[in-house]
């Protein structure tokens, strides 16, 4: 009897150990939390934690849905890349965003500008990509010959490149990035080489060591960019270009964005707020520039499309050097109905809570700041609303319609609280 009991006891222990082992190996994403590597699709369930130990690939023709409250932990030794050949839908909420990050102990001051994992890289076969209420941080690792993106000829397909947090490359695809945060990144936050695109209600901060833009568009893009806050990017808030020889011609409509302190940490003086080049068609309305380096700046050797329209933008500079760099030249573009003063302090936007004397080199962002406008702001009532947007009727991703937001009668991303 004792022998039989011992046998049963040992069998139970063996079964228990087997179960524990299975709980810690790679799991089907549909089951919830787990350690993930290789090909993935299905659903990462609400509130789960996914530990990414190596590069993951969403195969062509398949989709991965990430539900609200999911935390995706990227291994800082493997520095994984997320390769999307199918579709990705990151569907967070205001209370429970999706978060792509690293272990808490790795989020140090020394790693403030990321490079701890690769990025989200969407191949030309990716038809739909959604980031809604999604936080992306500590990305931007440098590629090597061993990188999946290099082996599969994705992004720039060479070693030694600093990856963007998000790359999208299907001129026939659909990309919506809304209500999301990009922070603590080495270089470009986003690098977009085609597609029907909406960027709305996003925040970008603490990004770029020696280069990097918040949103970098190339040829093939038809994009609406609205109600975004960009704080202290190393270089431009928006880089708008038609380079790359893709069809259609890049046509970017950017309106009601707020840019603060951008461009000052760039070691060379290329740009600092919005840069236009290479026959990009750019319509720029209702944008607020506060202490940015330069106004809207063009590449004089490869300028923008002559059909571009610029109007109703507001500029503020705390010191005279900043104001001087807003003044129209062959490089700095003046729009119609723009509000551009000539003296330091002109056109104070009257933010609810932001010290306008903050150093332009500052990249530390405070969530206590409030960039809404107070009564009496010169930005109130000065916005243009009677222009056409690309995606007013909306883009349908995974059966849901996402519309580019209506323009506002004020300038900037935020009106009165």
Image: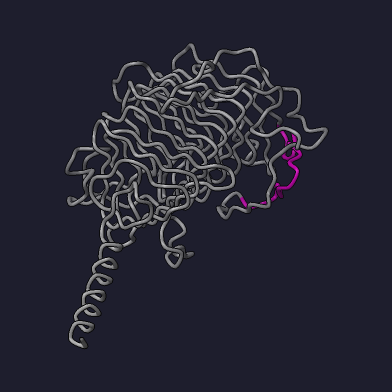
Task: Name the outermost residue toward the front.
Answer: 1
248 relative position to 5: left or right? right
Q: Main secondary structure of the magenta part?
A: loop
Residue found at the far right of this picture: 376
> Which residue is pictured at 33% across the width and 59% down the height?
75
Quadrant housing residue 23: bottom left
Judge whether residue 45 is colored magenta. no
Q: What residue is drawn where x is 51% and y is 21%? A: 253
Q: Is residue 133 left or right of residue 411?
A: left
x, y percent for residue 137: 45, 51
Find residue 367 and report its horizontal and vertical position in percent: 63, 52
Q: Quadrant of the C terminus?
A: top right
Vertical arrangement, residue 191 with respect to residue 77, above or below: above
- Residue 16 lies in quadrant: bottom left
Q: Nearer the viewer, residue 409 or 30?
A: 30
**Which quadrant is home to the N terminus?**
bottom left
Residue 389 x, y percent position in the rendering: 54, 16
Asked if residue 153 is positioned above or below residue 35 in the image, the reply reads above
Q: Is residue 187 visible?
A: yes
Membership of 350 in magenta stretch: yes
The count of marks equals: 0
In the image, the segment drawn in magenta is 342-359
| Position of residue 50 measured from the top left corner of the image (x, y, whole percent) | 37, 54
Residue 346 visible in rendering: no
Residue drawn at x 18%, y 40% is 152
**Would residue 140 be found to the left or right of residue 292 on screen?**
left
Eyeballing the image, is 294 above or below 170? below
Residue 190's image quarter? Answer: top left
Using the image, determine if residue 99 lies above or below residue 334: below
């Amino acid at each position: 009897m004792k022998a039989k009991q011992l046998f049963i006891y040992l069998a139970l222990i063996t079964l228990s150990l087997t179960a524990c082992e299975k709980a810690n190996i790679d799991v089907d994403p549909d089951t919830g939390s787990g350690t993930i590597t290789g090909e993935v699709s299905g659903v990462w369930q609400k509130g789960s934690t996914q530990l990414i130990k190596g590069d993951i690939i969403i195969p062509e023709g398949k989709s991965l849905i990430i539900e609200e409250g999911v935390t995706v932990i990227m291994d800082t030794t493997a520095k994984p890349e997320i390769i999307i050949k199918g579709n990705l839908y990151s569907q967070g909420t205001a209370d429970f965003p999706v978060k792509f990050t690293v272990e808490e102990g790795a989020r140090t001051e020394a790693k403030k500008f990321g490079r701890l994992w690769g990025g989200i890289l969407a191949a030309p076969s990716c038809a739909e990509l959604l980031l809604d209420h999604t936080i992306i941080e500590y990305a931007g690792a440098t590629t090597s010959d061993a990188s999946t993106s290099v082996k599969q000829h994705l992004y720039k397909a060479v070693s030694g490149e600093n990856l963007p947090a998000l790359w999208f490359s299907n001129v026939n695809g659909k990309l919506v990035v809304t209500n999301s945060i990009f922070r603590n990144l080495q270089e470009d936050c986003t690098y977009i080489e085609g597609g029907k695109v909406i960027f709305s209600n996003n925040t970008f901060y603490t990004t770029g060591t020696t280069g990097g833009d918040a949103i970098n568009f190339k040829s093939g893009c038809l994009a609406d960019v609205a109600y975004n806050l960009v704080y202290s990017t190393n270089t431009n808030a928006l880089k708008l270009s038609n380079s790359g020889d893709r069809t259609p011609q890049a046509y970017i409509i950017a309106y009601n964005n707020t840019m603060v302190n951008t461009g000052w940490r760039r070691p060379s003086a290329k740009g600092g707020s919005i840069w236009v080049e290479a026959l990009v068609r750019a319509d720029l309305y209702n944008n607020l520039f506060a202490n940015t380096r330069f106004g809207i700046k063009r590449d004089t050797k490869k300028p923008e499309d002559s059909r571009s329209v610029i109007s109703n933008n507001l500029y503020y500079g705390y010191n005279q050097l900043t104001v001087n760099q807003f003044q129209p030249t062959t490089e700095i573009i003046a729009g119609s109905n723009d509000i551009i003063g000539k003296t330091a302090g002109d056109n104070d936007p009257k933010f609810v809570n932001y010290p306008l004397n903050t150093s332009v080199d500052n990249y530390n962002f405070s969530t206590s700041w409030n960039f809404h406008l107070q009564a009496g702001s010169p930005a109130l009532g000065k916005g243009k609303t009677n222009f056409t947007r690309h995606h007013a009727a909306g883009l349908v991703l995974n059966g849901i319609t996402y519309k580019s937001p209506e323009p506002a009668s004020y300038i900037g991303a935020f009106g009165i609280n």
